[in-house]
Image (tube, rainbow, N blue to C red):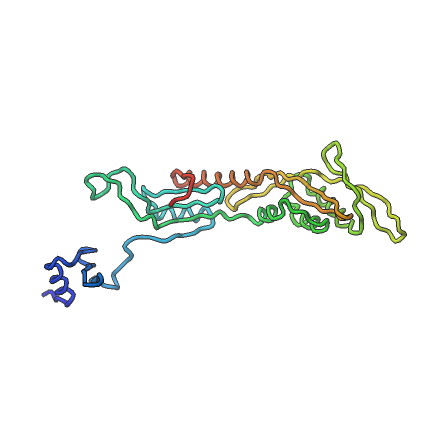
Amino acid sequence: MTTRTENDALIDALTEAQLSEQLTPGNVYAFKLRDRVETIDLRDPDETRPARKKGTVRVDDLASFVHYYAKHCDEASEVYVDIDSGRVTAVLDAHEGNMDVAGDADGVPAARWGEHRLVLTMAQTDKWKRWVGIDRKMLLQEQFADFIDDNREDIRVPQPAEMLELVQHFQAQTKVTFNSASVLANGNRRLVFTEETTAGAGAKQQLEVPSTLELGIAPFEDVDPYVVHARFRYRISGGDLLMGVWLDNAVDVRRDAVRTVVNRLQEELGVVVMRGTPA
């Protein structure tokens, strides 16, 4: 024998009066009162589950993106990339396309919520952040020498031994006055400086430094190192030497690294990654 509750009786009365509507057949009903709309949920609270997946999952590497996407995607899922920001967004419950949909005799594409998303923000490497961090900034001689010393393993040209010798020379010349700089036939710079002495007038010396560097650094964790070209820049101000690095192709390298990650995604997931940002 089925036991009827007060809710059952209320629903029957409201249904007969055409004042109620089934939101979830047999489970959730809505009915109109004078100043509001109320709902009755007959589901067992211990048995209820979310009606659909929603929320945004954020990952930091390619492997995590591939794993989550493969677990939750379907034929209508979509993937987008913003090349400039290095962000990949998957809309796992995207609108269905022009295909027959189960339960839809007319084959009308079904609109979906677009609220279950997966976002990959490509993590920049520490090396990349360090070099980009000093790009086009002039540093004092000692600061610049310390930076080159700490990061000389990223330099491919000149050879590390040459860079170490240059850095040690710079670090040793702390009590000097730089007078001028000239460009040599090979493109390098010749710096002329006077070393301070207790006798008064110091002897002038010369130091040749390269005009360019070739770096080997990866913009993101999921790609191999790229060749990044850089130029030395010098400025003599009040006898002090200021030095800096101008990265020539960092923007192009970063964009190409994003495309490399996107190509790997397309190969591993068998999807087309669209350029842009989903609404």
Q: Residue furthest right?
A: 199
Q: What residue sits 43% from the left and 39% below the top? A: 275
- Asked if 17 appears above or below 63 in the picture, the reply is below
Q: What residue sits 49% from the left and 47% below the top? A: 122
| Quadrant housing the C terminus | top left
Q: Can you tell which quarter of the image residue 80 is in? A: top left
Q: Is residue 38 left or right of residue 54?
A: left
Q: Can you tell which quarter of the image residue 3 is in? A: bottom left
Q: Residue furthest front?
A: 35
Q: At which x and y percent is residue 247?
A: 62, 41
Q: Can you tell which quarter of the image residue 235 is in? A: top right
**Could you tell me if residue 59 is visible in this image?**
yes
Q: Residue furthest top?
A: 185
* Closer to us: 14 or 76: 14
- Asked if 210 appears above or below 172 in the picture, the reply is above
| Quadrant housing the N terminus | bottom left
Q: At which x and y percent is residue 149?
A: 68, 48
Q: Is residue 59 left or right of residue 215?
A: left
Q: Is residue 41 left or right of residue 14?
A: right
Q: At which x and y percent is residue 196?
A: 84, 50
**Could you tell me if residue 43 is visible in this image?**
no
Q: What residue sits 29% from the left and 42% below the top? A: 96
Q: At which x and y percent is residue 241?
A: 74, 47
Q: What residue sits 15% from the left and 59% below the top? A: 19
- Asked if 32 appears above or below 168 in the picture, the reply is below
